[in-house]
Amino acid sequence: FSSEMFAGEVLETDLKSGQTLHFKLPDDGEKPGGEFTRRGLPAPYGLTIARAPHSLAEGPDGKIYLTDSIGAGITVFDPKSHAMQSYQVGGGALYPHTVRAAQDGIIWFTIAMSNQVGRFDPKTHISQVITLPATPSLSASGGPIPYGIDVSPTDGSVWYSKLASDKIGRIDAKTLEVKEFDSPVRGPRRQRFDAQGRLWVTGFSEGAIACIDVANWKADIYPLPRYAPNEIPAPYALAINPVTQEVWVNDTMLDLAWRFLPKEQRFVAYPMPLKGTYTRDFSFTPDGWACTANNPIPAAALEGGTPELVCIDPGKPTNAVAVSAR
């Protein structure tokens, strides 16, 4: 499953046949432009649809939870019946962003434009909004931009990154107490925990990924390889293969994806098949394929002009090139 924000759809792709089914989010009473229209603001990217799913996560109940960036809601999608229902976040939320599901079923998500994190309870359909500490923006965005988020597998704490403030924060899932730390890499964008409870973070502005021991806030930093002088990679997101614990990285500066082998501390490069790629995230099939999507803005920036789902089988011979991490 994937989300198509510009069309307001959930996509279901059969990897064997290549066929994709499209399911449009119902307006559910929302007007074009959603929360932005209500506030008299222009919607991002000129979108005029009522609901625009930005990110998705599968909950323990098997349902898909999507952040509705334009309508400021959470949409619940049943992959069996294809039924959908949206619920407003409230609390002044503007632009719900990245979403993750905790083991107890609670859905956590960042809210990028209002400096908040949200907590959605699938049983009550009620969201609780947590306002984050005010931190200065280090970019032209004008705000700190809470972006990536993940849930610790060891204690259930919720960790988020502030892309434009170089901060990483922790939320106690029970008390909702918030504590922030200086990020070991500049431009922390998306992040994931591995099975050991270490937090892996992309340094979008630094061209590196970091592995953080959150217990003592010590980090190992791994710069992405560079093929030309003064070239700075731009790692957007990363994901941890749940079986191998290898780290897959989306590089939005080059037409590449990276696979990092922690035990060997080296990267493997996978050239993308098209020019102008901008891949956003990785997910994994049960048989170990790593899947991502070509998703530049605008889509015309991509060779051929049609975004595609790209899946890599690391177990078969490929044109991958092993590159040292240091």
Image (cartoon, rainbow, N blue to C red):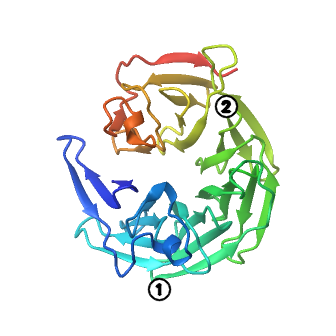
Horizontal side, residue 68 vs residue 77: left or right: right
In front of the other: 160 or 113 = 113
Place of residue 69 in the rendered image (x, y in percent of width and height, measured from the top left): 49, 64
Displayed quadrant of residue 87: bottom left
Place of residue 38 in the rendered image (x, y in percent of width and height, measured from the top left): 51, 78
Q: Is residue 56 visible?
A: no
Kindly state the secondary structure of the residue where label 2 is placed: loop
Place of residue 100 in the rendered image (x, y in percent of width and height, measured from the top left): 52, 61
In front of the other: 276 or 54 = 276
Q: Label 1: few (<14), some or many (≥20) within 10 Å?
A: few
Q: Label 2: few (<14), some or many (≥20) within 10 Å?
A: many
Displayed quadrant of residue 267: top right
Question: In the drawing, what numbered circle is on residue 178?
Answer: none
Question: In the drawing, what numbered circle is on residue 124?
Answer: 1
Mark 1: amino acid: Thr
Mark 2: amino acid: Gly
Pointer 2 residue: 207
Q: Given this view, does label 1 or label 2 mark the residue nearer the observer?
A: 2
Residue, x 56% and y 80% (percent of image)? 90
In front of the other: 274 or 160 = 274
Horizontal side, residue 314 vs residue 146: left or right: left
Looking at marks 1 and 2 on the same chain, the residue that comes earlier in the sequence is marked by: 1
Place of residue 239 in the rendered image (x, y in percent of width and height, measured from the top left): 52, 44
Quarter holding the C terminus is top right
